[in-house]
């Protein structure tokens, strides 16, 4: 390895918000279908006419669905760095240096997505625009990158928006 190649900086291409949204949407559709099937098998079919029963039905579905999302993101993003949606769109969750994120960071990031997404994204747009991090990405020291060359050297990193 020559000295010039070891001093060369690596670029991490940070995923666009729109790409992250579409990856989330794919995951949302998959998990919502699974969660609805599980909820229906436990609670039976739900009559959705406007009433207190409807509000209760929504609450009983929100909590288990959020838990399923939380577990789904933790397992796939910790083990593979990608959910199904991220894999389809060539995105990956990494630490700030482009390496596999730690379990703690993935748990923190997944918590924000599963339970507080609107707040997490809104505050992320305001406070972490340079690296396009949600607040819980920032707290967990994770970023979402666009996969260009997975074998790239990540010693000297230069961040670039896509």
Image (cartoon, rainbow, N blue to C red):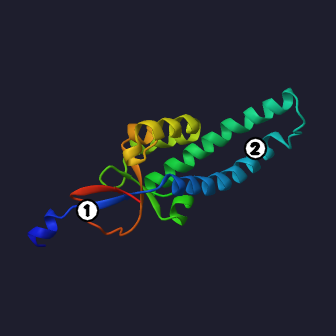
Between residue 38 and residue 157, name the one nearer to us: 157
Between residue 71 and residue 122, name the one nearer to us: 122
Residue that carries the numbered disc 1 in the rendered image? 10
Residue sitting farthest toward the top:
52
Task: From this view, report whether residue 111 is shown above or below residue 18.
Answer: above
Identity of the residue drawn at 87% across and 39% down: 48
* Disc 1: CA contacts within 10 A as few (<14), some (14-19) or many (>=20): some
- The percent coordinates of residue 141 (x first, y second) are 36, 43
Identity of the residue drawn at 45% across and 37% down: 126
- The percent coordinates of residue 67 (x first, y second) are 61, 40
Report how far apart the C-alphas of labels 2 and 1 lie in the structure: 46 Å
Q: Quadrant of residue 4?
A: bottom left
Mark 2 and mark 1 in contact? Answer it, CB < 8 Å: no
Q: Is residue 70 left or right of residue 37?
A: left
Label 2 vs label 1, nearer the camera: 1
Residue that carries the numbered disc 2 in the rendered image? 39
Image quadrant in which the N terminus is located:
bottom left
Going from N to C along the chain, the mark reached first, 2 or 1, is 1
- The percent coordinates of residue 11 (x first, y second) are 29, 61
* Disc 2: CA contacts within 10 A as few (<14), some (14-19) or many (>=20): some
Task: From this view, report whether residue 21 is shown above or below residue 58.
Answer: below
Local SS, label 2:
helix
- The percent coordinates of residue 21 (x first, y second) are 56, 52
Residue 23 appears anywhere in the view: yes
Image quadrant in which the C terminus is located:
bottom left
Between residue 97 and residue 15, name the one nearer to us: 15
Q: Is residue 22 left or right of residue 101?
A: right
Residue 108 appears anywhere in the view: no
Identity of the residue drawn at 35% across and 70% down: 149
């Amino acid at each position: 390895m020559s000295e010039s190649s070891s001093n060369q900086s690596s670029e991490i291409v940070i995923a666009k918000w729109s790409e992250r949204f579409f990856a989330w949407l794919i995951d949302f559709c998959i998990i919502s279908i699974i969660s609805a099937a599980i909820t229906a098998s436990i609670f039976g079919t739900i009559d959705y006419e406007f009433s207190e029963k409807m509000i209760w039905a929504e609450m009983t579905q929100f909590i288990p669905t959020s838990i399923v999302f939380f577990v789904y993101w933790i397992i796939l993003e910790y083990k593979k760095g990608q959910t199904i949606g991220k894999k389809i769109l060539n995105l990956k969750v990494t630490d700030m240096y482009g390496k596999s994120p730690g379990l703690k960071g993935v748990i923190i990031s997944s918590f924000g997505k599963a339970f507080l997404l609107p707040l997490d994204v809104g505050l992320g747009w305001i406070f972490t625009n340079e690296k396009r991090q949600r607040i819980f990405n920032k707290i967990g020291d994770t970023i979402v990158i666009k996969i260009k060359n997975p074998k790239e050297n990540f010693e000297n990193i230069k961040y670039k928006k896509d």
